[in-house]
Amino acid sequence: MISKKMKMRWKQTLAVRYFGFTKIPLILFVRPQVIELNKDVAIIKIPLRRRTQNHLNSLYFGTLAI
């Protein structure tokens, strides 16, 4: 059974992706996931993939700025 916290994370992730789809397409391109989001903390996970990594195998600065 999925916990209430997991459902909330999933809804927040969908909200971020929808915002990326409608307003800023680059957000949708990097496929972020919400780990924690409340009034004090916002933790977003962006996977290190071919799209988001540079030739030094670290995240592009533009990806970090998203």
Image: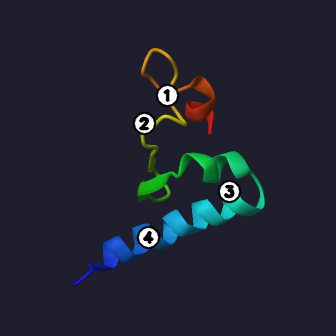
Q: Earlier in the sequence, mark 3 or mark 4?
A: 4
The circle drawn on residue 53 is: 1
Q: Give the x, y percent position of residue 14.
A: 54, 68
The circle drawn on residue 10 is: 4
Quadrant housing residue 51: top right
Q: Given the image, on which type of amino acid does mark 4 rest?
A: Trp
| Element assignment for label 2 | loop
At horizontal 45% and vertical 15% (from top left) the residue drawn is: 56
Asked whether 48 or 32 is in front, the reply is: 48
| Element assignment for label 3 | helix
State the colouring used for the structure image. Answer: rainbow
Q: Give the x, y percent position of residue 6.
A: 33, 72
Cβ–Cβ below 8 Å for labels 1 and 2? yes
Q: Earlier in the sequence, mark 4 or mark 2?
A: 4
Q: Residues within 10 Å of mark 3 (few under 14, many from 20)?
A: some
Cβ–Cβ below 8 Å for labels 3 and 4? no
Asked whether 5 or 61 is in front, the reply is: 61
**Residue located farthest toward the front when viewing the structure as drawn:** 50
Q: Given the image, on which type of amino acid does mark 1 rest?
A: Gln
